[in-house]
Image: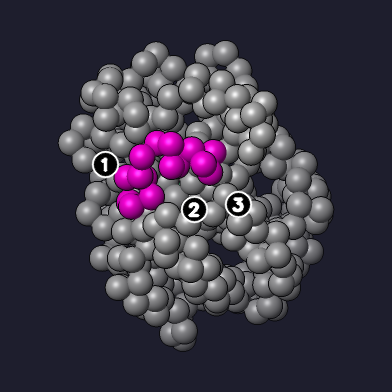
Amino acid sequence: MDAPMSREVKSISTERKMVQERSEAGEAPPIEYIVKESQRPADTSPLLTSPLPVVYLGQPDEAEEIKTALQSWGMFQVIDHGVPPSFLDELRDIARAFFSLPMEEKQKYSNIRDGQFGKEGYGNDEIIAEGQILDWTDRLFLLVQPEDARKLELWPTNPNSLRYVLHEYTMKTKKLVENVLKATAKSLELNEDFFVSHLGEKFPMFARFNYYPCCLKPNLVFGLKPHSDGPLITVILPDKDVEGLQVLKDGEWIKVTTSLDALIFNIGDQMEIVSNGIFKSPVHRVVTFSGKDRISIAMFCSNLPEKVIGPADELVNDMRPRMYKNLKVKDYFEVFSQRFLGGKRAIDWAQI
Ligand code: OGA
Ligand code: NI
């Protein structure tokens, strides 16, 4: 790395303290992390705790189960996913090991390059507006597929099994997502390959390792602010011991619980659009705790940026008129990113 570049990287990354550094220094969350009073986790605290619906893949009624789960929750858990629990443990251990590295080591993969925020790498959200409320989380965000588009310079070599395990997990996730999407298509009475062929072989998949450090004032901040996911579908491997994910269902926040080693599937805005609103992309959030930190690994599967998506013709009729316009995926993401940072949703931009 030449000198001017490292100077620039440093000037931005030192201005922006990582949440983990604040947490380890025993700092209470500064003002830019404090959520407006009416929206704080404590003021909208979940009264309900409920296990996510379970879908048994490959069983005769999987499509029916998926339909029921997606129409009521927008998400479900899969237990019989075939990924060995020891492998999931290894992945979670790798995530924890990465975030436990010294800051200088993690900053080698910083999402700030040449003084510019990049989508991929280790870091936080970009700050684009004054008054933007920041989330109490640090992350490592990487494009994992298509393979030839990986930016390996941002893939940590420490812990040294990270690259290999992430590659393996990508392959397993891809297979599982294809199975889930086939069942989802059947549940909408579409051709089984509808979503899979819509995505194509080279669809982008991103991995996000989320780290939510302990917070001295957990009721004043979000680990992740309320949002829906932008892509078609997301697979979440939650922390083994610490729950923190909540979903808005019928206007109430519900603490999500799952079986040990289950994978969570939730749909994103692209699915809401293509299904013509039969499935709604769920609003969810993550809360933090004073005495325990949390990790999760989310895999986001999206249509290609240049693709134009819109409601499937088969799902538009007199009874259910077209509810969303056709739009280019990358245009949607542009609107999505801006609005996400401001704590707003983008789906109304797609609505007719
Ligand atoms: C996300 C997300 C949930 C979690 O990364 O978009 O919603 O449990 N994560 O960390
Ligand atoms: Ni999410």
Residue, x 44% and y 17% (percent of image)? Answer: 32
Comparing 55 with 161, the one in front is 161
Residue 341 shown left or right of residue 247 in the figure: right
Q: Amino acid at mark 1?
A: Asp
Residue, x 47% and y 84% (percent of image)? Answer: 58
Q: Quadrant of the N terminus?
A: top right
Q: Visible in this render: residue 132?
A: yes
Badge 2 crowding class, 10 Å Cα cut-off, few under 14, some 14 to 19, many 20 or more, is: some
Q: Which residue is mark 2?
A: 156
Comparing 262 with 317, the one in front is 262
Q: Secondary structure at mark 3?
A: helix
Q: Of all residues shown, which one is farthest toward the left?
A: 291
Determine if the magenta segment contains residue 51: no
* Callouts 1 and 3 close, C-beta under 8 Å: no
Residue 26 shown left or right of residue 35 in the figure: left
Residue 4's x, y, as percent? 67, 26
Q: Main secondary structure of the magenta part?
A: helix
Residue, x 28% and y 20% (percent of image)? Answer: 27
Residue 170's x, y, as percent? 53, 67
The mark lying in front, picked from 1 and 3, is 3
Q: Amino acid at mark 3?
A: Glu
Q: Quadrant of the C terminus?
A: top right
Residue, x 60% and y 45% (percent of image)? Answer: 120
Q: Which residue is mark 3?
A: 153
Residue 351, numbered circle? none
Residue 89 shown left or right of residue 236 in the figure: left
Marks 2 and 3, Cα distance to the nearest angstrom?
8 Å
Q: Which residue is mark 1?
A: 293
Q: What is the magenta range? A: 96-110
Marks 1 and 3, Cα distance to the nearest angstrom?
28 Å
